[in-house]
Image: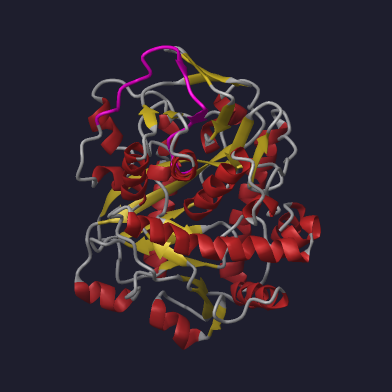
Amino acid sequence: MGATLSGDPAGRYRELSHWLSTLDEPLTPRPALPGDADADVVIVGAGYTGLWTAYHLARAEPALRIIVLEKEIAGYGASGRNGGWCSALFPTSLTGLARRHGRDAAIAMQRALHETVREVGRVVAAEGIDCDWADGGTVTLARTGPQLARARAAVDEARAFGFGAEHLALLDTGEATARCAAEGVRGGTYTPHCAAVHPAKLVRGLARAVERLGVTIHERTPVTAIRAGSAVTVAGTVRAPVVVRATEGYTPALPGQRRTVAPVYSLMVATEPLPAETWARIGLAQRETFSDHRHVIIYGQRTADGRLAFGGRGAPYHFGSRVSPGYDREPRVFAALRRTLGELFPVLGPDVPVTHTWGGPLGVARDWAASVGFDRASGLAWAGGYVGDGVGSSNLAGRTLADLIRGERTELTTLPWVNHRSRRWEPEPLRWLAVNTALRVMTTADTTEMRTNRPSRRAKTLSRLLGN
C-alpha cells in the first residue's frame, strides 16, 4: 500500500531507500489485477506480513488459490525501507504482557520471538534468498547514568522471567566497547537474537518464493475497501471467503480504519562505504546491529558493502493520519541523524558523506500492542502494529495467520497477541496532540539526560502510561 508514483515507476521505486536503490533486479511492477477474480484467500499488502502469510499458507495447503494485492510493488512500504533488524523485539515489554495476559503468556511470546529469528534464517537459506544475512545479535549501548540504569533494569526484567545471559547479557564498559566503540560508552546489553539483513532483498526474494509456490501477486492494484468476502480494487473485486489486511502504516487510508493505527515516520541515512581502518575504530566486526538506551529510538547496522545505515524516530506525526511521499524526507531529522552519528562515532566527523536519505511510516496501535487475528464469522484477518519491530514479528504473524485461517490450534494460535483488540486512537485533534507531545517529551528527556546525567521523570511517567 502507499501513494501511487507517477512517471517511470521502476526508476522512482529505487529512490525510496538505499535498500531499493541497490537491488540487482528490475523493479518493473507485476501485472495489475485484470478484473474481477475469485480466490480462497486474498491478502491486501505485499510487504513482509502479507508475503509471509501467503508463504506459510501455500506451504501448508498447496491447493489454496491465494491472491496478493499491492498498490505499488512488493516491498514498497516499511518492508523495503526499514533498518534491517530481524530481531526478537516486541513493542510491549515482558512486564506489560504479563500484566495483560499473565506471566506464562509473556514468556511464551518471548520464546516464540526468539525462535522466529532462527525460523526466518532457515527459510532464507532454504529458499536461496540472498539478503546479506548476518547473525551478529544486537548491542544496545549505555552512554549516561540513566541509560545504564535502564540497561540494568532490562536485564533484571529478563531474569525475572527466566531468561538468562544467553538471551540478554549486561555488558561492562570494555565488553560494550569491544562490540561497538561509540563515544562515552559506560556499558550496555547484548542479545544474540537478531540478524542484520538487507530488507529489500529479503522482501523481494520472499515475493519470488511465494510465486514459486503458486501464489499470484498483482501490483499497481490499489485496494479501495476491505469487506467480508471481498477486497475491492480500482480494477475489479476479488471475492474470497478469507480477506487478510496486511497494510501496517498505510492502514488508515482504508475506509473505517482511520483510527486503527497511527502512522509514525521513521527516517534513515546511509554513509558511503567506509574504509577498513574506520571500521576498526567503530567495531561491529560481526555486523552487530546497534542502538542505545535513550528514549527516542535510534538504530543502525554495518551493511554488507561496508556502509553505516542509521535511523531513528523524531519525524512528526501528520494530522489526520495522513501518509504522503513528501513526508518521507525531513531535512531537519536527517541533519539530526547525521549529528548523532558524529556524536556516537567522532571518526566519521562532518567530512564523511551521507549518500542516501529516506524514510517511511510504521504502524502504532493505541496501546502500543502488536496483534494478529482472525474472525472466522466474517472471514476477516489482520496483523500489524509492530511499532517498527516487524521484520521478525511479521514472520511470526504470517505463521500464526496460516494456522488460524486453516483452523489449526497450535502453540502459535494461543500466544497473547492473537485476537488482541487495541482500542482506537482518539479523533483529531487529540490524536495529533497526543503523538507529537509524546515525541517532544521523549526528545527533551534525552537532551536533558545527556546534559545533566539525570533521569527524566516526565519520560518515566509517559512510559508507564504507554503500558511498558
**What is the chief secondary structure element of the magenta stretch?**
loop
Q: What x and y, as percent, mark residue 14? A: 27, 38
Q: Is residue 207 left or right of residue 172?
A: left
The front one of 36 and 227 is 36
Q: Can you say whether 180 is above or below 61 in the image? A: below
Quadrant in the picture for the C terminus: bottom right
Q: Can you say whether 258 is above or below 210 in the image? A: above
Q: Is residue 456 shown to the viewer in this render? A: no
Residue 262, by quadrant, is: top right
Which residue is located at x 52 percent, y 32 percent?
250
Q: Is residue 379 shown to the viewer in this render? A: yes
Q: Is residue 375 left or right of residue 178?
A: right
Which residue is located at x 25 percent, y 61 percent?
352
Q: Is residue 8 left or right of residue 136?
A: left
Q: What x and y, as percent, mark residue 448? A: 61, 64
Q: What x and y, as percent, mark residue 99? A: 80, 59
Q: Can you say whether 52 is above or below 381 in the image? A: below
Q: Magenta segment: does it hold 32? A: yes
Quadrant in the picture for the N terminus: top left
Which residue is located at x 61 percent, y 27 percent?
320
Magenta segment range? 28-49
The front one of 301 and 89 is 89
Q: What x and y, as percent, mark residue 290? A: 44, 67
In this view, the residue farthest toward the front is 63
The front one of 158 and 302 is 158
